[in-house]
Image (tube, rainbow, N blue to C red):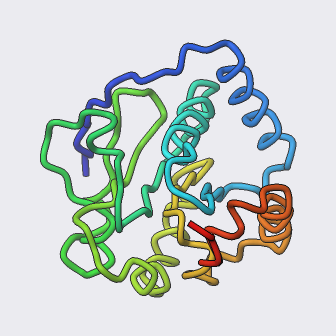
Amino acid sequence: MSREVVTLAKKTKGEYSYNEAIKTLRTNVQFCGSNLRRILLTSAFPDEGKSDVTFALASSLAQIGKKVILIDADIRKSVMVSRYQVETEINGLSQYLTGQREMEEVIYNTNFEGLSIIFAGPYSPNPSELLEEDLFHELLDALDEKFDYIISKAGDNILAANAKYDITKDVVNGLNKRYKQNPEMAEKISGKSKE
């Protein structure tokens, strides 16, 4: 089955330090060994650059000849379609996970050689439950057979909502360290802000 090609607007930061940081991230991923093929990018808060970094890493890996698929698993509030100015009607992950579409109907090739994408699809009020379904894990297993890397972007609430992502305690420890360094942020999150 020939996949539909979507054209993504080429949005680059253009900043030398940002581009070098993405290349460093790519190199570090490669040095983690051939067993590291699934990567999830998330953060604790909105607007911290998850979409940008996810896309930049995925396209950077594709530029060096890797076959990469980007999964936008931020089913609640994805920005990928609008940010990359996709003008065609697309099917997405939420439709696959609810049985409305088959796997091949939600995978799109892009105008970036070696990069395919699964968009989030229509808004879903229960993204955590959908991502915990066996169908999502079956999708990841099937994609492992076809791609060198699976780069996923999750919503900012994924740490609390979805334990099945197998996020390590190092991520949680890193967040705790960040909160300790910024007491005002910790107060806002805990609801104990004096504002």
Picture layout, residue 17 above or below residue 105 = above
Identify which residue, 192 or 12, lies in the foreground.
Answer: 192
Identify which residue, 35 or 54, lies in the foreground.
Answer: 54
Q: Which residue corresponds to the image point at 78% horizontal and 29% vertical from the top-left?
A: 24
In the rendered image, residue 12, in percent from the top left (x then y), is placed at 48, 21
Picture layout, residue 120 above or below residue 8 = below
In the rendered image, residue 121, in percent from the top left (x then y), is placed at 26, 61
94 to the left or right of 194? left
Q: Quadrant of residue 179?
A: bottom right
178 to the left or right of 89? right
Q: In which quarter of the image is residue 10?
A: top left
Q: Which residue corresponds to the image point at 28% horizontal and 75% vertical from the top-left?
A: 124
Picture layout, residue 2 above or below residue 63 = below
Identify which residue, 194 or 32, lies in the foreground.
Answer: 194
47 to the left or right of 41? left
Q: Which residue corresponds to the image point at 72% horizontal and 26% vertical from the top-left?
A: 23
Identify which residue, 157 or 105, lies in the foreground.
Answer: 157
Q: Which residue corresponds to the image point at 55% horizontal and 70% vertical from the top-left?
A: 141
In the rendered image, residue 78, in percent from the top left (x then y), is placed at 35, 55
